Amino acid sequence: MKTSKRIRSLDDLSYISQRTPKILTLFSGGLDSSFILKELAKQSQAEVICLTVDLGDGVDAGDLAEIAHRFNARSIVVDARDAFARDAVLPAIRANARYMGMYPISSSLSRPLISRYAVEYAAKLGCGAIVHTANQSQNSLRRLNGAIEQLGFAGYYGTPYEFSALTREEKIAQLKAIGMDKFQARGISGDANLWCREFESGSLDNPESFWVPESLFDWTAVRPGSSFDTGFIVRFEAGVPVALDGEEMPLVELIAAANQKVGSFQIGRYAGLEHLEHGEKVLEVREAPAAFILMDAYRHLEMAILDAELLRKKLTMEQVWVREAIEGRWYDELRTAADAFIGASAARIRGTVEYRLRSGAADVCSIKAEGARYLTDRDSWEKSVAAVRGARGLAATQVAGEFGLVTA
């Protein structure tokens, strides 16, 4: 790792801002990224480009442009929803990507793609630095840094919040002093994309005693009088979900539809601990209805089609895949190799899985797979197998008799 190129503090930010004419920042429009724009505007004459990668979390391009303009920066919003679904979510479905088998991973999928766009735009626009705003209590720090490094970016990169730990209140006060009073005191923070909405901090800080406001939830919010029927059918072709309830649709639309319908039955809520880089644990709450149902359906089809020994080995490789993604090694060889192993059988996954949805649960009521190994008529199978095996036994007895052998 070229640590001399790492941005880790506000002093580092000042240093690099005097040495590169163009700086790219990953920009959400939130407190942390807005504060960095203030610092850059104060410290340098460098041109600042604010890159926002839209992964389906409701980006407001007008609001982003307004904040960027306030600090003489330029805002660029990239619609990466299709790329995210294709390059991150689809592999995650095939890998049954759940952290420790508990809940769907999310930022581990989004940060590598955000980094890819950051490196591409930095090269295209001639930026000598990529600045993000993760801090030490966020796993995004190593995921963003790891991906940027693995992608071969030669400039400065990192987050000034790694070593410069300002409180939220301190950042709010400094921004308020220059007329920006839209930010509020620390509460629950969130991260969202088309696959998952996750939350941390605030009332979720202490795993021994926490409460989750119902207002956090969107897809799984209770909506009296919901018009969704209880049937749910998903069809896969060559390992790709292609249709819901008989209607074919692109993957991004399919995920959105599944989130709305499955979520309306309050299915897909999770809470669990995740480890930080040095072993500490933090609590996260998330909702991911589409992730729940699509990974479950994919597993049922795998069970129907694939050999048992292959499935046992795949379970091991799935956790290798998840571990490498979690640890920020998305573009390293091991995750790529695990992905190749997992993807090798994906072309064989074809069929439909049908559910009956009820409050808090999805009951499987039909599995129809092409090239399936399951039995559909056990009695007929029993008779057929008995006839074949019995004939083999009779033939063996007859052969033994011809040679004068005694069989027991």
Image (cartoon, grey):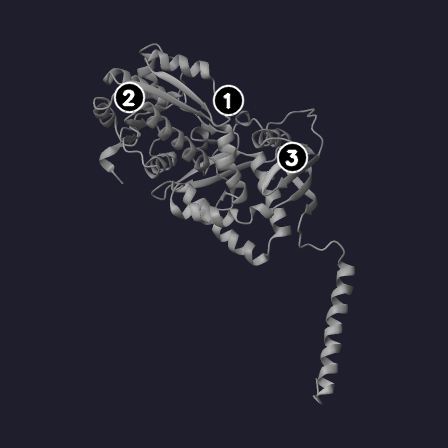
In 3D space, how far apart are the residues under numbered discs 2 and 1 (Cα atoms)? Answer: 28 Å
* Residue 199 pos. (x, y %): 47, 31
Can you identify the residue that label 1 sits on?
58
Q: Secondary structure at mark 2?
A: strand
Residue on which disc 3 sits: 243
Question: In what element is the residue under mark 1?
Answer: loop
- The residue positioned 72% from the left and 82% from the top of the image is 399
Label pair 2/1, CB-CB below 8 angstroms: no
Left/right of residue 128 with respect to residue 391 in the rendered view: left
Relative placement, left or right, of 131 versus 112 is left
Circle 1: residue type: Gly
Between 121 and 330, the one lying in front of the other is 121
With respect to residue 279, does 66 lie above or below?
Answer: above
Q: Which mark is drawn over residue 22?
A: 2
| Quadrant housing residue 73 | top left
Comparing 171 with 387, the one in front is 387
Q: Which amino acid, mark 3?
A: Ala
**Separation of disc 2 and disc 3 at Cα?**
45 Å
Cα gap from disc 1 to disc 3, whole angstroms: 24 Å
Tell which circle, 1 or 3, labels the residue nearer the N-terminal end: 1
Q: Residues within 10 Å of mark 2 (few under 14, many from 20)?
A: some
Q: Residues within 10 Å of mark 3 (few under 14, many from 20)?
A: some
